[in-house]
Image (cartoon, grey):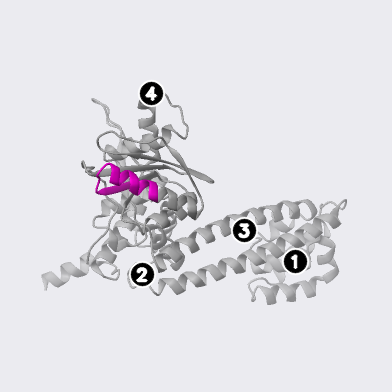
Amino acid sequence: MKRNKTKKVKIINEKTMIVALDIGKGVHHAYFRAPNGKDIEPFPVYNFRKSFDKFWMTMCQFKREQDLVDIVIGFESTGPYAEPLFHYLRKKPVELVQINPMHGKRIKELTGNSPNKNDKKDPRVIADVICLGHALTVVIPEGPAAELRRLTQARERAVEALTVVSNQLQQLLFVIFPEFLNVMKNTSTKSAIYMIKNHPAPEDIVAMGLESLTMVLKKISRARFGLERAKELFEAAQHSIGIYEGKKSILLEIGHLVSEIENKTRYIQNLEKQMDHYLEQIPYSRYILSIKGIGRVIVAGLIGEVGDFKKFNTISEIMKLAGLDLYEVSSGTHQGQRHISKRGRSLMRKLLYFAAMNAVKTNGIMHEQYHQMLGRGMLKMKALIAISRKLLALIFALVRDNREYMENYNEIRYLKLAA
């Protein structure tokens, strides 16, 4: 099987045409350069098909005039604005590459000895970086992996929005019934949401009576909350210091926020069901899921962010994609500390960090290693990042070898060899 990977574009030969694109929301700016130094002034490319077609025809004409064979098209790593043009170009006989914005910034300082930024200068800077060989080929997820990337990003946005709404709800509750937050510590539970939705004000709870409140809490919480919790909430309602002025308007907004929370929660659940559906279409996902403490949401997110683990040959490539590759700044007798570069996919690092937190729990697979690191004086955050790196290496190895995770694998292997 042919392996595609993110790799440096090292050779730009005398038959290679360089096309640089400065990506924008409404308009991109394109720049052509031939190996003999012949170029054309940057010109606009608008986000509609006629402009894309004109851009392609102009490119082909320049290629013919300069008697060139290959075309390399490069742009800075960017958000969604490059995607329509990228999908248009990926079907053409060209090589698509991207450059790190940090490299562009460094070269920009050398161009004219000025940090000046404009639409005419930026494409030329991108072309300079490509000529120096500091561009990376683009690996984009396809099929189920592409769906998982979109679903993971949608879930991230939904969770962030849910957090915002939940915080607003807590602020309003504190105004009219501050004691509620002391009794029901987590306002996102089913019991708390039910009470806020149906009996948000202290007088509503008092009107229920202790016996009725106890029965409701016991039913909604499935017997987790009983008489003690009901008494605590009832007494808090009787002696609440919540305000009365403007309460009707606050209750109206609380009702709206509760409705939003319910809608967003259902939406997140639906996204997670879709994740399960697409995970089943990726055969190697079961190898990653075999690791204790790594759930389906994390696995779906990692596959979506990577695109395809099998398109990478070495762990160093995938570490770099995540921004978990290490660097240090040392000079002379000074030995600098090692840090992660963070020049990669931030969501991928976040998912691995959550996986690491699960892995270091009491019965987690990395619990012992984590505490060994802490025993050597390593800070907790650095230790968790180190565990994230170990988990990524483990995931890569399992996918590469088509093997499920086996706890105490080295001990079992040693015993087999000894036998």
| N-term-proximal mark, 1 vs 4 | 4
Q: Which amino acid does label 1 sit on?
A: Lys
What residue appears at the point 40 percent right and 39 percent down from the top-left corner?
Answer: 101
- Give the total of numbered labels: 4
Which residue is the site of mark 4? 112
Q: Verify whether residue 70 appears in magenta.
A: yes
Which badge, 4 or 3, is on the more N-terminal residue? Answer: 4
> In the picture, which quadrant includes the N terminus?
bottom left
Residue 26 placement (x, y as % from top left): 54, 46
Q: Where is residue 361 in the image (x, y as percent from the top left)?
A: 42, 59
Q: In which quarter of the image is residue 286?
A: bottom left
Q: Quadrant of residue 182?
A: bottom right
Q: What stretch is highlighted in magenta?
A: 57-73
Marks 1 and 3, how far apart at CA: 16 Å
Q: Of callouts 4 and 2, which one flags the residue occurring earlier in the amino acid sequence?
A: 4
Residue that mark 1 sits on:
197
Residue type (three-letter) at the residue carrying disc 2: Ser
The vertical placement of 230 against 26, above or below, is below
Identify the residue position indicated by label 2 in the image. 285
Q: Name the residue under label 3.
A: 162
Residue 87: x %, y % from top left = 42, 57
As measured in the structure, the alpha-carbon distance from the residue carrying label 4 to the one carrying label 3 is 48 Å
Which residue is painted at 84% across and 51% down in the image?
A: 243
Callout 4 crowding tier (Cα within 10 Å): few <14, some 14–19, many ≥20: few
Mark positioned earlier in the residue sequence (1 or 2) = 1
